[in-house]
Amino acid sequence: LTCPATSYLSTGLFGQPVRDYIAYNVFMISMFLDDFKASATLKRRKGYCVQKAVLLVALGRVVGIPSRLAFAAIRNHKLPGHLYKITRGNVLPRHGYTQFFLDGRWVSVAPTFDYAISQQISVPAVEFDGVHDASLPEIDCNGNPFIEYVEKFGPCTDLPLDWIVEATSKAWGSDKRAWLDK
C-alpha cells in the first residue's frame, strides 16, 4: 500500500476518516438492505458499525485495495443501561468492521466510534496507521474493561444481511429501520 492510498482511507472524506465523518449512532440499526448502502450512509452522515464498515469497504475498493467485511460478537462492558435492556445483555452479536489486504495480509479496521463519541465515553479513539490492526479497544481511558471480542466470524465479500437480521432482530424487531431523525 502506498502512502497516498493510506492517507485517502484515513482522511478520505473531506479531510476526515470515515470514523469521524460518519457519526456513530446505534439507532441506525436496520433490517433493510437500502439502509446499508454506502451511498446512503455517506448521505446521512451517521450509521452504526456495520453501515460504517460497508462504507469503508466501498472506499477501499474504489481506490483499488482489496477490501471485505468482517464480523464478531463483542461484549461491551460500558453499554448504557437503556441499550442493555434492548439487547438483553451486553453481548452484541454482529459487530461489523472492515479488512484491507495490505502488504500481503488482511488488516482489520473498526471505524465504529467517532472521535467525539470516544471522548464522551472516555475510550481511546481507534487509529488506523495502514499497517496494524485497528480494533476496538479492550480498555477505556481509565483502565476499565471496554470491548471484549467474544467470537470472530469468517469474513464476507458482501453484506450478509439475512445473517445479521437473524441475530439483531431478536432485540430490535424484524421491521426496525434506521431512525433518521434521532
Image (spheres, rainbow, N blue to C red):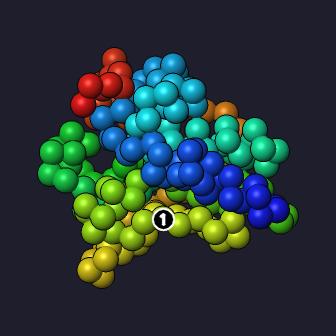
Depth check: give the residue in front, 145 or 100: 100
Count residues near mark 1 (Cα–Cα under 10 Å), then give few for <14, some for 14-19, many for 20+.
Answer: many
Residue drawn 32% across the image and 73% down it? 140
* Residue 115 visible in the picture: yes
Q: Position of residue 134 (x, y in %)?
A: 56, 65
Q: Position of residue 113 (x, y in %)?
A: 40, 54
Q: Which residue does the numbered mark 1 point to in the structure image?
A: 126
The quadrant holding residue 171 is top left
Q: Is residue 109 left or right of residue 174?
A: right
Which quadrant would the C terminus be assigned to in this image? top left
Q: Secondary structure at mark 1?
A: loop
- Please say if 156 is above or below 29: below
* Residue 70 visible in the picture: no
Q: Is residue 5 left or right of residue 114?
A: right
- Please say if 144 is above or below 1: below
Depth check: give the residue in front, 40 or 16: 16
Residue drawn 30% across the image and 82% down it? 143
Residue drawn 68% across the image and 52% down it? 8
Depth check: give the residue in front, 95 or 38: 38
Which quadrant would the N terminus be assigned to in this image? bottom right
Query: In the displayed image of the protein, which residue is found farthest to the front?
Result: 14
- Please say if 175 is above or below 5: above
The amino acid pointed to by label 1 is Val
Q: Position of residue 41 (x, y in %)?
A: 49, 31
